[in-house]
Image (tube, rainbow, N blue to C red):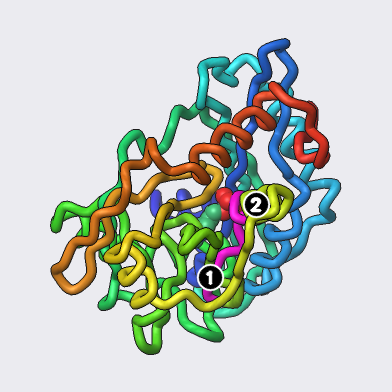
Amino acid sequence: MAKCHSARLFPPCTTARLFFEGLKAYKHADGQVSVFRPDKNAIRFNKSAERLCMPELPEEIFVQSIAAVVDIDREWIPSKAHHALYIRPVMFATDPFLGVQPSATYKYIVMTGPVGPYFSKILRVKVETNFTRAAEGGMGYAKAAGNYGGAMLASRQAAKEGFDQMIWTDAKEHKYVEEMGAANVMFVLDGTLITPSTRDTILDGVTRDTVLALAREWGMPVEERRVSVAEILEGAKNGKLTDAFGAGTAATIAPVGSISHDGEEYFLIDPKEREFSQKVLKTLDAIRYGEVADTHGWNYLV
Ligand SMILES: *Cc1c(COP(=O)(O)O)cnc(C)c1O
């Protein structure tokens, strides 16, 4: 039967375990190509694999596989400002088996595609207090497909209400900020850069880590801790919240224009007047596109 045949070509494992990574290759003005911090993605790739009972990859094989694909796709990397080659490594289970158990066979593939800026506008976001992205003991820290499938209905609902993104909150009380869509979320409150500390409900973002490192170098006070929705809304009201943005490879630094909670919308200062996120975005771009010396060793040259 045709159905059995296609099942053979692409065997469906009932448990359908799939996880992925996301990173970018950038073209410098002199034609050099670099991938941003792929060693960090290699570590996270293996954390996801471990959580899903899937095989880990030696870090150097992960990095080399990416370099090999980027090398082949070199001509596909756009040289326009803010453009890059998005790289999507994926691993999935392939056992043709219906029971719920770890697969014995897997496929690891690397896909790419040229991309422009992800968000071209200032985001109107809502604090999500109904749906949950990740709970303690769950797999929010893994880049597992299930996490994103589970978020889609919430995204669609938010879009219907006119929002671009939602700020996820903790599963228990919906009182603490966790992430923003599929990016980490960061704030400048009373001169301090604050962001939720990583734990099992939060994806340990490479962009987040990079922004924190830069802020610390610049001598800015930084706090990784529980961040309550109440303090953010209070800051928006009294003007002490001077910056709010999503941080991720796809999103880069995505400015939040307003935050809505319980039907009330709180507007933040004009993104063009935000000192920190402007500086961070400029610096990140300058490093990634090779316009300044890469003193941190973040660019992996291909
Ligand atoms: C990928 C992702 C991020 C951002 O991670 P980067 O390494 O900075 O790209 C943040 N949150 C979630 C849920 C993600 O899937």
> Front-most of 95 and 155?
155
Q: Quadrant of residue 177?
A: bottom left
Select label 2 or label 1 by which is in front.
2
Look at mark 2 in the image and give the residue it sits on: 215
The C terminus, quarter of image: top right
Q: Is residue 117 left or right of residue 34?
A: left
- Relative depth, front residue between 269 and 182: 269
Residue at 24% over, 55% down: 267
Q: Which residues are magenta?
A: 201-208
Residue 11 in sight from this viewpoint = no
Give me the residue at 59% from left, 21% from top: 77
Q: The disc labelled 2 sits on which kind of residue?
A: Ala
Residue 198: where, in percent of width, then height?
Answer: 61, 71
**Residue 204, magenta (yes or no):** yes
Residue toward you, 141 or 178: 178
Left or right of 298 in this view: 206: left
Locate residue 292: give its quadrant.
Answer: top right
At mark 1, the secondary structure is strand
Give how far across and how far down residue 291 sits, in percent.
69, 21
For disc 1, the marked residue is: 196
Label 1, residues with CA under 10 Å away: few <14, some 14-19, many ≥20? many
Residue 30 is inside the magenta segment: no
Pointers 2 and 1 in contact (CB under 8 A)?
A: no
User: What secondary structure do most residues of the magenta stretch adopt?
Assistant: loop
Amino acid type shown at disc 1: Pro
SS state under label 2: helix
